[in-house]
Image (cartoon, grey):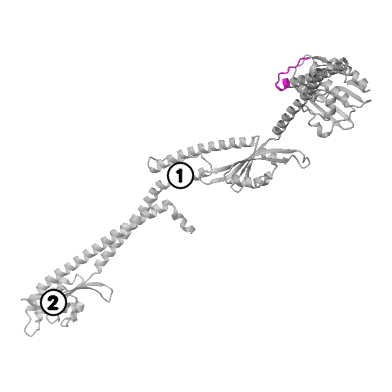
Amino acid sequence: MKTLLPFRTIQAKLIIMVLLLILIALQLIGVYFISTMKSSLINSFTQNLNRQAQLLMALADSAISQQDKSGNVEESTSAELNQLVGNLFSNSGTETQVLDSSGRVLATSLEEHQSYVGRKNTSLLVSRALQGINDNTEEIIDSDNVRKKVIAQPVVSGGKVIGAVYIVASMKELYETMERVNRIFVTGMLLALGLTALLGILIAGTITQPIKALTRQAAAVAEGRFEERVPVLGDDEIGQLSTAFNEMTDRLSEALSVNEEEKEKLSSILSNMSDGVLATDEIGRVIVVNRRAQAMLGEGAIGKTVSECLDIDKAPIAETLGGKESILLIQRPLSLSQSEDHLLFRVTLTPIRRRDKGVVGAIAVLQDVTESEKLEQSRREFVANVSHELRTPLTTIKSYAEALDDGALEEPPLAERFVGVIRSETERMIRLVTDLLHLSRFDSKQAQLRRQMTDIAEMMEDVVDRFSLQLRQKAITAKVQVDPGLEKAWLDRDGIDQVLDNLVSNAIKYTLDGGSIHLAARLNEAGQLSVTVKDTGIGIPKKDLERIFDRFYRVDKARSRSMGGTGLGLSIAREIVRAHGGHIALDSEPGVGTTATVTLPYVQEGGEAP
């Protein structure tokens, strides 16, 4: 089959088609021409023989009429016939015989056939001629394989057949002429075919070369090379096709560029989405995973089903692949070692539809709603805590006011104690509302720091002095340590005092009698001001450390409330420290103590505040 490949090209087909057309045309012309010429030559040859026969018949009529009544021809008459026949037809290569009415040969033109004289010619044509039939011709092939023409004509005198003329003429020269004509025709046909093939190659090349260029350009376009162009060689159909193909290449290149740009945009958007995205095929296998989804679910999601990746039932996936959208909430453990903490995902399942095929897959969008749920939970807890914190003193105030109204005012000692309780609860509500307003200002970014040059050692000593009474009451030892060289810093003195008061107050509350509190200030390795408050109190459990700065969060709710705390102190302290550009952290071990570390940018006099 490989040997037939060259004949599959358009150029070869065009050349073969043209050659076949020329060959068929020449064959038809040759057959018609040769057959017509052959018929013409044979007819001319036959007519020439008939004229010779007519001439000979006229000459032989008088000679045969002189026969004696006995049927013999005089010797002089026979000699005259032989001389006549020999002179007329000896050089033409034709044998001519004159026969009497009985068919005997009276004379012959060939010397070697003189022995035939006096013998009877038994040819069928002679018999027909002696019967008066004029149309007596045939072609024969003799022993030498030479084709000859035979004619027999009757000699009529006075309406009576008195003899016959018999002519045998060789057609060798005629057929040699035909053979020469055939050779000339074949030679001409071969030359015509050769010239036609050469012209066919040239003409086919003008057609196939642009087609080959188009083919090469189509292959280049299929491989993604759009910079090449098809040469336009004219304004004919192929030229118009080349122009149209170049325009199509330009438009295809532009379309692919736009498609690639959109694909890159989509890939960039998909990779940088805050939500996880999974795309599946028509049977639910994951084929596309973005970066966020990998962070949520881990590696190896490709090739798995969505139900396996999300660890959910297959029914919602089947419904989505059937064309129905659905939304699920699922929980996943944060890690195998922390099974108590969970991530909460909202999964939106949407089918992927194609116009001609219907649903061909599904899109699963994973939204991590853990933080929003935590915030919602914190908001609910905050509202509940605020309500509870306000309801308790209001209930107390209402109860004591009703008691006073019911007659307690008439008993001065009792009335004075009730009024004291009302005043205390009112002050507690004022502190609570003040703290809430303080936090609100920080949340709305309305709180402004009033920075001033602050002596660190003096500030630390002042804190201890403010709590000296409480320290003496519980026999707690307080120690202040400031690194040498650490003198003044650019701080909001009131705000930092409030932070330190809260930390020291908590340390005193949760440190047993006879304990110690250590306050220290130093510059850390990063050049920041680090203030620590370390106590030897009861400590904070590990599970409460993460939420210790939440609003209204108390480790021991009953004890904290009885000590007059609102549960907002550490929250306010954190906001103040953040406003300074620093951070606060607690490190605690139950039964050993707690260390609170406040880290602030160290800005000296003349420096730029952050």
Q: In the rendered view of the protein, which quadrant contains the C terminus?
A: top right
Q: Of all residues shown, which one is farthest toward the bottom?
A: 70
As for residue 444 lying within the magenta part, the answer is: yes
Q: Amino acid at mark 2?
A: Ala
Dot 1: few (<14), some (14–19), or many (≥20) neighbours within 10 Å?
many
Q: Which residue is mark 1?
A: 214
- Which residue sits at x=63%, y=47%? 315
Residue 190 on image: x %, y %: 34, 57
Q: Is residue 414 left or right of residue 86?
A: right
Question: Going by the picture, which residue comes out furthest to the left?
Answer: 158
Label 2: few (<14), some or many (≥20) within 10 Å?
many
Give the image location of residue 529, x and y in percent.
82, 22
Above or below, 369 against 212 in this view is above
Residue at point 68% right, 35% down? 369
Q: List x then y, in percent, for residue 316.
A: 63, 45
Q: Is 116 placed above or below 601 here?
A: below
Q: Give residue 164's mark.
A: 2
